[in-house]
Image (spheres, rainbow, N blue to C red):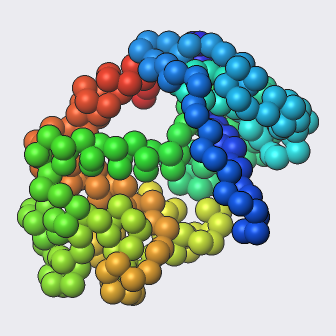
Amino acid sequence: MTRFASLGLFCVFALAACGPSSPPEPPVEETTAISWPDKDWEGSTPEQEGLDAQAIAQLDEEFRSGKHGYVDSMLIIRNGRMAFEAYYENDYQTINADRVRGESGPWNYYDVTWHPFYKGSDLHTTQSSTKSFMSALVGIAIARGELPGVGATLGELLPHREIADPKMAAITLENILTMTPGFEWDENVSYWDPRNDAVRVESTDDWVAYLLDKPLANDQGTTYNYNSTNTQLMSEMVSTATGRALNEYAEELLFGVDTISDIS
């Protein structure tokens, strides 16, 4: 399985529920031992892993027909095994032919030469999946004692930044992780819209400074507001705490361990 490292992962979880009036079902004993992958995933089938093969086949056909938009891959992991793997060819050069580089900033949201494959290669741009990787790196830094914990504040973790507002300085790492720091931020309009803060921040040289210059709209921990620059904020926190470039830290402690290769 050679393309897994460079393509997005689409996971399907099957949940079973019974009505409130039905007696509880006895717990089902797991009969399939979990396979812990090393360099490669062990191959299997939906049937062998107790999955609904017919439902998966139907979803596969829907992806191939374009019913759900442009999907590039579907991989289903169950019990540590690759129960299903499929790839779908989309001609993005044709699909995005009318889009011009730089229309939505330099970070490729609608760029024919970038999205969704990095500069015409077979490396898939992960976009906001990066938030999950960044959260994992925060957890690694905490486990290694390099970050004090999720209760640490902006003022403590970014001492080199001038944060005049004491409320802003008191924002915690947990607030950043849960998208509840309280910054005034609008990422709900289209990424074609110049009012979108994600588009605006991409035109600046210092994304963290742009965010810290924003006023607070809510008290910390009270309101969820999607903010892509929170990831950059966490990146600087980890780099400051570890004294290392984030890409080097990630390659050693996350990508190297998970055998994720061919990244950029």
Residue 87 shows up from this direction: no
**Front-lying residue, 41 or 181:** 41
Left or right, 152 with respect to 77, comes to left
In the depicted structure, whether residue 264 falls above or below residue 37: below
The image shows residue 180 at horizontal and vertical percentages of 39, 73
- The quarter of the picture where the N terminus appears is top right
The image shows residue 199 at horizontal and vertical percentages of 51, 62
**Front-lying residue, 129 or 174:** 174
Residue 34 shows up from this direction: yes
In the depicted structure, whether residue 145 falls above or below residue 170: above
The image shows residue 47 at horizontal and vertical percentages of 76, 23
Residue at figure coordinates x 71%, y 56% from the top left: 17
Residue at figure coordinates x 39%, y 83% from the top left: 222
Residue at figure coordinates x 48%, y 73% from the top left: 225
**Front-lying residue, 21 or 6:** 21
- Choose top left, top right, bottom left or bottom right for residue 79: top right
**Front-lying residue, 64 or 174:** 174
Left or right, 39 with respect to 54, comes to left
- The quarter of the picture where the C terminus appears is top left
Q: How many numbered discs sit on the rendered protein? A: 0
Residue at figure coordinates x 35%, y 49% from the top left: 135
In the depicted structure, whether residue 44 falls above or below residue 168: above
The image shows residue 16 at horizontal and vertical percentages of 71, 50
- Choose top left, top right, bottom left or bottom right for residue 116: top right
